[in-house]
Amino acid sequence: MEKVYFDLQGQKERADQILGLLVRYHLHDFNAEGQYTGMEPIGGIREKLWFAYAFLAEGSERACLIGNAIIALSHYQHCHFSPKIAIQIIMKCDEMLTDAARKRLYAYVEESIDECALEEMDFVGVNDNFPCMSTFTTLLGGKLLSRPDMIEIGIKRLHQLKQMLTRRGFVSEFNSPTYTVIQLETLADIANLVDDAELREIALQCEERIWADQFARWHPATSQIAGPYSRAYTADSTGHTQQAAIYTVLGDLMAVNPYNTLFASIDGVEGFEIHHNMVFQHMAVASFVNTIFHCPKEIVEHALNKTYPYEVTGTMEFSSSSDEHAWESPQDPVLADDMVEYPAGVGSNTTYMTEDYALGTSTHEFHNGVQTDSFHLLLRRNPHAQPSLRNARAVYAKFTVNEKKPGQTNTYERMTCTSPEFSLWDEGRKLAFQHKQTAMVLYKPKRFGRLQVTSLKLTILMPCPYSEPDEIWLGDRKLEDLTGESHDPCPVYVKDGAVYMAFHPLLLTNHGRQAAVRVERVNGYLTLSFYNYEGEARDFDPKTFVLTGNGFVVQVSSEDESEGFEAFRERASQVQIEDKNLSSPHSRRTVLRRTRFQSEGVALACEYSPISEGIRYMEVNGQALTNEKLAITGYDVSRLPFM
């Protein structure tokens, strides 16, 4: 039976509306020659082609003139994104193109398609948005250029994605607020533009699987996608509005969306986090909505009628990786001494929801983990208020060396680079798993950070753009100003509207520090930090550094699930924790970290090697953590493709 896709006509109307707003807000940012004259930087060829694509798709005379001028004027260089955009313009806006613009686009596709065909652009367990785009480029670019060799490569790649989704519940670049939309948009346009019926069906099936993942993790009460996230920028982790694909499908059924925030005015809605800048977000969203998605109606209806508690869990696979910057050569010789390979493998991730909160964890990281939110908590403060950014808060964690801070640029001296204010990198390696609303998160620092260390800490970040939590307690001491510190490790209890949290520090290796726990305000965040070291600049030997233990167990509850915050704190204080490093002559003096946590109704345990990252076991209530391929509360996953 042919699938029924959700609101195809509404998708077209929403795309037209967004494209119209983009033209209204930004057409004047280009002169008649196609030169950008706006105030905010927009980047290179990708961004210029995004603008041209959106202007041409909008279709008005002036927009088409400027779109063609942009194409004719632009400098074309290597880019993973731009060949796909060029092909989309040719295939979807051909009647709007001048001969000069069309010639430039064809020439660019011809000169870039062979690079898109390299094996490194296969599905290799890392950045799945790249092979999605290269699949599109080789399939459709091969058709445009009469290159059957390219088409064969595209066919191979589409089957690689099918095989990954046959093996695993999620793609490797799973649940990324920034990059999953690229996967969806690219697969949708393969299905829309490819001629071969079999290839179209595979593209539709892969798109459906990713839609099932996205809508299973959509948390209607906050109008956000819950974690964990494979790749997240600050706006993604904090709470964002750039969910272009989901909005295109849902429209007003998504309470917080690009139309009523990003496009509410040329400057958007005041106060919320954006990625990069507003102009960048406008053109990116306008480009991503300019397709017809194929989300089965039954998946949307399931998402709109979730019953709680609700859980989605599944497996993913990941490539080996390291902290080397592939785009920088030669490699920093000092960093080379501390470069380690992170092994490939298979992991799982889980998202547990009630109406009041959504807790997500991932047993393993994506790539080298600098952008992975292996722990992410999303909550609504007032259960009686409508979904909004003001009523939502996200809570997530980063390990930092030498007091890196959110909301600002940070320099990573040993990697000879600086991260922008919209991307705070994680300088630790972590694993996390959970049972319902209780999660264990284990951390260690990355070896490359071991020299000239002045501080080592794991920070739990609570963004506060609109409000702050109501109460924070360090053990049995209430912090009057929500800030303070404890010399000794102690649990931290947080009341945030109708949601309660207890953070229990784990091993917390002490290399010398002024405080073990500190809560402070930093650049619009409340930060809760567990310190390993704080003092004069010091070099650590590699083994000591990597065996530095940190982490926490978090318990989450809502007002409805507890008998008040005091009763929650009392119950949460009745826990048993064991966390230590072990070595045995039988294991040739290698080191294992054994961690056990027990409270009423839940026992979590893990034993793993901090050096090699091998995991002996993760255990929930005396049973091995199940790695079910895919399970979604109330949904028969056998109905999904490749299951």
Image (cartoon, helix red, strand yellow):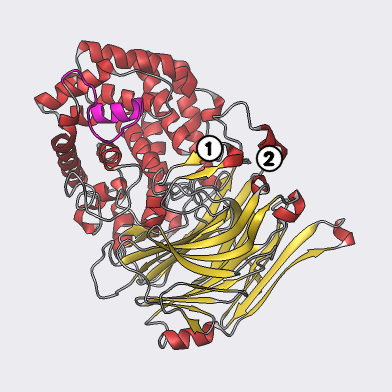
Judging by the rendered image, the residue that carries numbered circle 2 is 339
Using the rendered view, name the quadrant where residue 507 is placed: bottom right
**Which amino acid, mark 1?**
Cys
59, above or below 168, in the image: above
At a point 52% along the width and 61% down the height, the residue shown is 459
Would you identify the image quadrant in which residue 549 lies?
Answer: bottom right
Residue drawn at point x = 64 percent, y = 65 percent: 513
Q: Where is 365 relative to 319, above or below? A: below
Q: Residue at 51% x, 87% y: name it.
A: 570
> Picture coordinates of residue 465 (x, y %)?
32, 61
- Residue 314: x and y in percent read 52, 56
Q: CA distance from mark 1 to mark 2?
A: 16 Å
Q: Which residues are magenta?
A: 32-53
Q: Which residue is mark 1?
A: 417
Residue at the far front: name it: 536
Mark found first going from the N terminus, 1 or 2: 2
Closer to the camera in the image, 379 or 14? 379
Q: Amino acid at mark 2?
A: Met
In this view, the residue farthest toward the left is 61
